[in-house]
Image (cartoon, coloured by chain):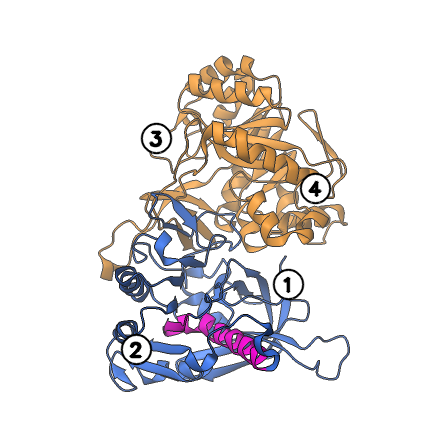
Amino acid sequence: MRRRLTVLSNRELGAYRVLALADPDGPEPRPGQFSMLAAVEGWGGGEDERPHLPRAFSIARWREGEGGGEARESGREAHYLLEDVGPGTRRLCRLRAGEEVWALGPLGRGFAAPAEGRRAILVGGGAGIAPLAILQDTLQIRDALQDTLGDTLARHPGAAETVVLLGFRDSAHAQGATLLQGARIATDDGTVGHRGLVTELLARELDEDSGAVVYACGPAPMLEAVRALCAARGVPAQLALESGMACGFGACFGCVVPTRDGGYVRVCVEGPVLDAELLERVDAHAGAPA
Amino acid sequence: MSVRFCRLALTHPVINASGTFDLIAADAAFGESLRADFPFAAFVSKTITLEPRRGNPPPRLWESPAGLVNSIGLPNKGLAGYLEHDLPALAALLARMRTHPPVPLITNVMGSTATEIAQLLSACEQRSEIAAVELNVSCPNVKTGLDIGADPVQLQRVIREVRPCLSKPLIVKLTPNTVDVAACALAAQEGGADAVSLINTLRAMALTPASRGLNPWLGGTTGGLSGPAIRPVALAQVAAVALRVSIPVVGMGGVQCARHARELLDVGASLVAVGTESFRDPGAGSRIARGLRAPLGFDG
């Protein structure tokens, strides 16, 4: 259930902030899972007398440290990538070390590991790069284990082969790319990397290797472009979706997206990571409360 | 703190508002921490209709000042799907919660005619897992346009007609979107209801920003407002109803802590239901129940 956590740090990263929370009793998240966050103090009374509901954030990184010398501390910390885009995110962006946060999580279904022999292509846009950071961490850990244990583990495409493609509005946002390693960048204004859309980079990659598996998170138009590209080429894609949520644990039925079979699925419990082939257009639903 | 309500023995006076807690999803998400401290003294299902419903197209939510506007549209598997799948699953989960005695299950149903409601009640009568039925006559965000509960004459006639189908306790969930909610409550009582519950969400609307043309934001065009924004309205309506009826009243609307719950009990509610606050804190029911047990002045 809900945990009351202390802010360890809240550092600037270009247009973003990286919020680190001490989470001594938190279960280890799977890449792609998320938490519902709300400041303990001062949650409400911002623009339009909001926020009222907690906000959903992908877990960007998870660390299990040495414990900082205190035996009772597990040293576990969770990192979140924040961008000030509304009264909820604004309050969280202003948190200082020592302040407290209500956190519920890890929630939802995360990414599934790539099938044997398939190269992973990670495609992120804006703040949607967050779950790709912990995914890359996990793929690298698996890779390191494999180097140690040799053939005792199933052959898995190495981190060196993993392609990371990230798209941002401008150079201030592109600084977020430092959360991941070896990223190739596209910016709308061309100030960093390729001038244009990250999906243009993806199209080139898929032209060269249609045997890859795509992991994507970002704004709905980007995800829709990824879905369409992958569908046209028969490439499997796992999309981490964002949707307005009140609860994050399946109670409110507010975060649904349409599926190809004519129904709806809840992003919070059936997702947030969904197989692209299950989905209708993913830009048909509107965004989250910010 | 134990209470008797409509022939049910409850360990405390806090239950959930219909449609605000999916027990199956919550158990999958929280497991043992939910079972060890189940938040509600009775569990109310989401609304079940005769036929399956997909619910409204998204977007379904709008955060408003100190509240939430929703237009979910009562998605459910329909009566047959509920009886076959969800009801046994809910009963099995409630049996796993570490509560003594086990938490009773109240099934919430909605029909657009007396004939439909009679079918729903008759089905509930047959199933031993169901301890009581709550009849939704008030949902404002459904295009089928159910307003049975807004007109006291119509409401009394419908309740009287369907009442013989059910020997179990019948709770009528009133609509707040009416001229005189106390008159509707009295009509429900005269029709044969064992209790009334209120308030449901208040009809509400939100628009897209001017840059996007000031169109309705919600896929269902209008929705229902809940959360602390409606608490003073709930207090007034529960007080008015409790003065007019002799049957028990379940009070709800924006309850976030024990102090809010105590206010509803003070104006005449027998039970308090928690809805939107469970979205913020899935353990809110337990927190509020603990606060009610504590001495006055303690806020859970």
Residue on which the image places disc 2:
A169
Gap between marks 2 and 3 measured at Cα: 44 Å
Label 4 packing within 10 angstroms: few (<14), some (14-19), many (20+) = some
Colour-to-chain, orange: B
Would residue A241 be found to the left or right of residue B248 on screen? Answer: left
State if disc 1 and disc 2 touch (CB < 8 Å): no
The stretch drawn in magenta includes residue A141 = yes
Residue A290 placement: quadrant: bottom left
The amino acid type found where label 3 is placed reads Thr
Mark 2 → mark 1, Cα distance in angstroms = 34 Å
Q: Is residue B250 magenta?
A: no
Q: Position of residue B260 (x, y in %)?
A: 61, 47
- Magenta region, residue range: A118-147
Residues at marks 2 and 4, CA–CA distance in whole angstroms: 50 Å
Q: Nearer the viewer, mark 2 or mark 3?
A: 2
Q: Secondary structure at mark 3?
A: loop
Residue at figure coordinates x 34%, y 45% from the top left: B57
What is the secondary structure assignment of the residue under circle 4?
A: helix
What type of secondary structure mainly makes up the magenta span? helix
Residue picked out by circle 4: B96
Up-down relation of residue A238 to residue A156 (above or below): above
| Circle 3 Cα neighbour tier, 10 Å, few/some/many (<14 / 14–19 / ≥20) | few
Alpha carbon of mark 4 to alpha carbon of mark 3: how far?
37 Å
Read off the chain for label 1: A
The residue indicated by pointer 1 is: A3
Q: Which chain is blue?
A: A
Q: Which residue is mark 3?
A: B144
Q: Position of residue A19 (x, y in %)?
A: 53, 76
